[in-house]
Image: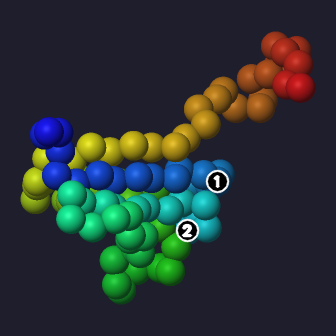
Amino acid sequence: MTGFHRYVGIDYSGAGTPTQGLPGLRVSVATRDHGPREVLPPSGTRSLWTRKGLAHWLAATLREGPPTLVGVDHGFSFPLRYFETHRIPTA
């Protein structure tokens, strides 16, 4: 039996500033009793998640419990300018 009661999946796609709404930034939550459900940004905010908004939501969600496993789908990479400066092929 797992020690986690809740699972949060985050698709962290798209370039932009921390306060810019991103269509590729999506959040889903599943529990032991319910399958995954998409979580929309809190009411009163923009219709799209921002990185800053997601960070605040996640911190508050984790503080309230229960034990939660969080997975982030994110392609980490250096900025394209780094590859250009050091003449590193990108393809």
Give SS at disc 1. Answer: loop
In the rendered image, is residue 82 in sight?
yes
The numbered mark, 2 or 1, whose residue comes first in the sequence reads: 1
Q: Give the vertical position of 90 relative to 18 (above or below).
A: above
Assign a secondary structure to mark 2. loop
| Residue drawn 21% across the image and 65% down it | 33
Task: Report the Cα–Cα distance between label 2 and label 1.
Answer: 10 Å
Q: On the image, which quarter does residue 52 sit in?
A: bottom left
Percent x, y of residue 24: 61, 61
Nearer the observer, 26 or 19: 26
Instruction: Quadrant for residue 75, please give it.
Output: top right
- Relative placement, left or right, of 6 versus 71 is left
Task: In this rendered view, identify the residue nearer to me: 31 or 59.
Answer: 31
Residue 81 horizontal/vertical position (percent): 78, 29
User: How many numbered dots are placed on residues in this image?
Assistant: 2
Q: In which quarter of the image is residue 58?
A: bottom left
89 lies above or below 33? above
Q: Quadrant of the C terminus?
A: top right
Q: Residue at x 11, y 54 (%)?
A: 66
Decide: few, some or many residues near mark 1? Use Cα within 10 Å; few <14, some 14-19, many ≥20.
few
Looking at the rendered structure, the kind of residue marked 2 is: Gly
Q: Do the residues labelled 2 and 1 touch (CB within 8 Å)?
A: no
Residue 53 visible in image: no
**Residue under label 1:** 14
Q: Which mark is residue 69?
A: none
Which residue has dot 2 on it? 21
Describe residue 81's horizontal placement relative to residue 42 as left or right: right
- What's the residue type where badge 1 is placed? Gly
Examine the rendered structure and indicate whether residue 76 appears above or below residue 67.
above
User: Residue 34, relative to residue 17: is it above or below?
Assistant: below
Q: Give percent across and percent down for residue 2.
A: 17, 39
